[in-house]
């Protein structure tokens, strides 16, 4: 049948269409419990094409079963290779309550230990491999700043490019040693942006000093993939990076990367609209040198409405048709497609799962990850003010008041906001606690702990800092804990400020130890220019 390049009919080469199909992710394999695998016309009814819905797959054990079935029933196809965002800290597709979560990159930067970064990569890799996921869209190699860009923040290892480079390379080594492909992102770096790429297209005059160092370090560590972002760097090109031959040449020729280049998620309107829509963006990206057009990872974060599932199915088909037609018309060279297909096939062969391939046992992998998470949290939580007041003086009968400030909820790429509030239970194991809503009077005279995760409203203000300042009167001891971006502490009048970097169980336990145990914190905020 004739296909079209944005409306113009051309004849289809079946072999070419199959090659193009390999380059568009997610794939067409049906992935759901007991549903088998393979391309399915019923996919819009079951879920988004090629995606594992966590509304259907409700635990790591079920996920393991789905991927085993898919691997065992993929005879004649390439080894199973499914992608996932499991960065640690803020963004984790596998975020069921039973899953041990790493504190994240900024916590690793605060700990400042390459061995811990390698252990974090290995631990995440063990968890992923155990459930049949062998391609991680991590680590973030962007540097952060003060105040933190909303899209980066705790996802970054810090603001010092040399330290970020060392930690990123260590994470890559650990992850890939566990049998999971790593992806350095978001080339050529989001450091210095002032808008969230999920909401608007960032434009930079030039790259910040050392922005390429973390990517070079990841490449030197043999990283399997690099994700190219949607930011425009005017000193390089006036086109988004993922559609810029100059940016791709920089990655290939100057940095020497020979692996798979992946696009940022083209389904995001802020990513595809500057290029004229999803299909045109895909054509521009592949023509520029991108190997894999990413429309999403293979694990969804929840149940999508039927209309959205149908739209995703149609969008993928549209992209495949448009890319195929672009090659037939000479807009994209066949050699370009051949190179991309060869790289993607090699990635499948190297990291993909065949029937009977070794997988760690989930309970053991998860228990190991929890041990690593605890070690990282213990070395990373930082006290930036009032360390001499710790541990808190808590005579018998003293009531510890907790004030949790609700999230603002403006960030995308953030699954950690759904993490349970562990702090009250953790502290109540030692002392009597009283939970008071933000803005309400505090009826006790003892210490008050104000805490939140994502409460920043402007570059120099957060609701948590405002709440702590409201309560820090008449000599009262007020502790503010930031479980997310450290910017939440800016402008606070609290007598004690603590940066925990993540809301996950291990980080909360470390905060508990510092507040009511030995009072010793070992981390240092790895962001230059921070002010409290």
Image (cartoon, grey):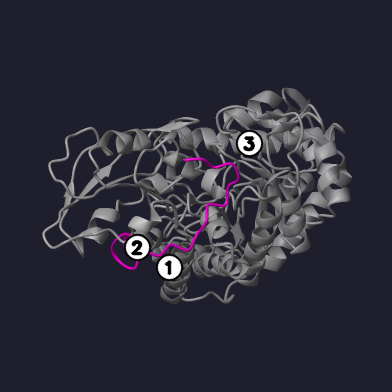
Task: Kindly identify which numbered label has been placed on residue 231.
Answer: none
Packing grade of label 1 (10 A; few <14, some 14-19, many >=20) is many
Residue 524 left/right relative to 228? left
* Residue toward you, 360 or 326: 360
Residue 396 left/right relative to 195? left
Q: Is residue 40 visible?
A: no
- Residue visible at 48% across and 54% down in the picture: 89
Quarter of the image for residue 346 reads: bottom right
* Residue toward you, 27 or 474: 474
The rendered magenta stretch, by its main secondary structure, is classed as loop
* Residue toward you, 304 or 363: 363
Residue 516 lies in magenta, yes or no? Answer: yes
Packing grade of label 3 (10 A; few <14, some 14-19, many >=20) is many
Q: Earlier in the sequence, mark 1 or mark 2?
A: 1
Mark whose residue sits in front, 3 or 2 = 2
- Residue visible at 28% across and 63% down in the picture: 516
For the residues bearing labels 1 and 2, Cβ distance under 8 angstroms = yes
Task: Kindly identify which numbered label has been placed on residue 374.
Answer: 1
Task: Kindly identify which numbered label has been placed on residue 266.
Answer: 3
Task: Kindly identify which numbered label has been placed on residue 509.
Answer: 2
Which residues are drawn in magenta? Answer: 512-532
Position of residue 77 relative to residue 419, above or below, is below
Position of residue 426 relative to residue 285, above or below, is below
Quarter of the image for residue 98 reads: bottom left
Residue 388 x %, y %: 37, 57
Position of residue 275 relative to residue 172, above or below, is above
Residue 517 lies in magenta, yes or no? Answer: yes
What separation in Å lies between label 1 and label 2 (alpha carbons)?
8 Å
Mark whose residue sits in front, 3 or 1 = 1
């Amino acid at each position: 049948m004739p296909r079209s390049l944005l409306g113009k009919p051309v004849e289809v080469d079946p072999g070419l269409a199959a090659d193009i199909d390999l380059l568009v992710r997610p794939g067409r394999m049906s992935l759901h419990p007991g549903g088998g695998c393979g391309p399915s016309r019923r996919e819009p009814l079951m879920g988004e094409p090629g995606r594992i819905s966590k509304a259907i797959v409700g635990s790591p054990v079920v996920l393991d079963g789905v991927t085993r079935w898919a691997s065992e029933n993929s005879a004649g196809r390439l080894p199973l290779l499914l992608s996932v965002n499991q960065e640690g800290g803020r963004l984790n597709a596998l975020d069921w309550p039973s899953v041990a979560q790493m504190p994240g990159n900024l916590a690793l930067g605060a700990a400042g230990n390459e061995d811990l970064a390698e252990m974090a990569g290995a631990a995440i890799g063990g968890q992923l491999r155990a459930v049949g996921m062998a391609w991680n869209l991590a680590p973030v190699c962007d540097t952060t700043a003060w105040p933190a860009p909303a899209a980066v923040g705790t996802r970054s290892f810090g603001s010092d490019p040399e330290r970020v480079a060392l930690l990123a390379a260590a994470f890559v080594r650990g992850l890939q040693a566990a049998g999971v492909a790593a992806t350095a992102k978001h080339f050529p770096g989001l450091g210095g942006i002032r808008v969230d790429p999920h909401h608007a297209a960032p434009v930079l005059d030039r790259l910040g000093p050392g922005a390429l160092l973390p990517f070079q370090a990841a490449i030197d560590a043999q990283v399997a993939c690099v994700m190219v972002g949607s930011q425009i760097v005017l000193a390089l090109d006036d086109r988004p990076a993922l559609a810029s031959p100059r940016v791709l040449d920089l990655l290939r020729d100057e940095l020497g990367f020979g692996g798979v280049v992946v696009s940022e998620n083209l389904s995001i309107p802020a990513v595809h609209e500057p290029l004229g829509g999803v299909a045109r963006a895909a054509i521009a990206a592949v023509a520029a040198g991108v190997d894999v057009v990413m429309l999403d990872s293979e694990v969804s974060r929840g149940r999508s409405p039927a209309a959205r599932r149908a739209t995703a199915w149609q969008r993928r088909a549209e992209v495949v048709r448009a890319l195929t037609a672009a090659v037939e018309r000479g807009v994209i060279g066949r050699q370009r497609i051949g190179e991309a297909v060869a790289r993607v096939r090699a990635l499948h062969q190297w990291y993909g799962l065949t029937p009977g391939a070794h997988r760690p046992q989930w309970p053991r992998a998860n228990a190991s990850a929890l041990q690593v998470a605890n070690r990282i949290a213990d070395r990373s939580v930082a006290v930036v003010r009032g360390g001499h007041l710790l541990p808190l003086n808590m005579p018998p009968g003293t009531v510890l008041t907790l004030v949790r400030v609700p999230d603002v909820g403006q960030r995308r790429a953030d699954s950690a906001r759904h993490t349970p509030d562990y702090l009250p239970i953790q502290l109540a194991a030692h002392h009597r606690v009283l939970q008071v809503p933000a803005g309400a009077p505090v009826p006790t005279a003892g210490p008050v702990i104000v805490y939140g995760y994502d409460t920043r409203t402007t570059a120099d203000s957060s609701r948590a800092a405002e709440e702590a300042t409201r309560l820090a009167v008449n000599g009262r001891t007020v502790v503010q804990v930031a479980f997310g971006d450290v910017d939440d502490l800016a402008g606070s009048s609290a007598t004690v400020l603590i940066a925990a970097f993540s809301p996950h169980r291990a980080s909360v336990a470390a905060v508990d130890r510092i507040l009511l145990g030995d009072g010793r914190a070992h981390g240092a905020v790895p962001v230059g220019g921070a002010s409290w």
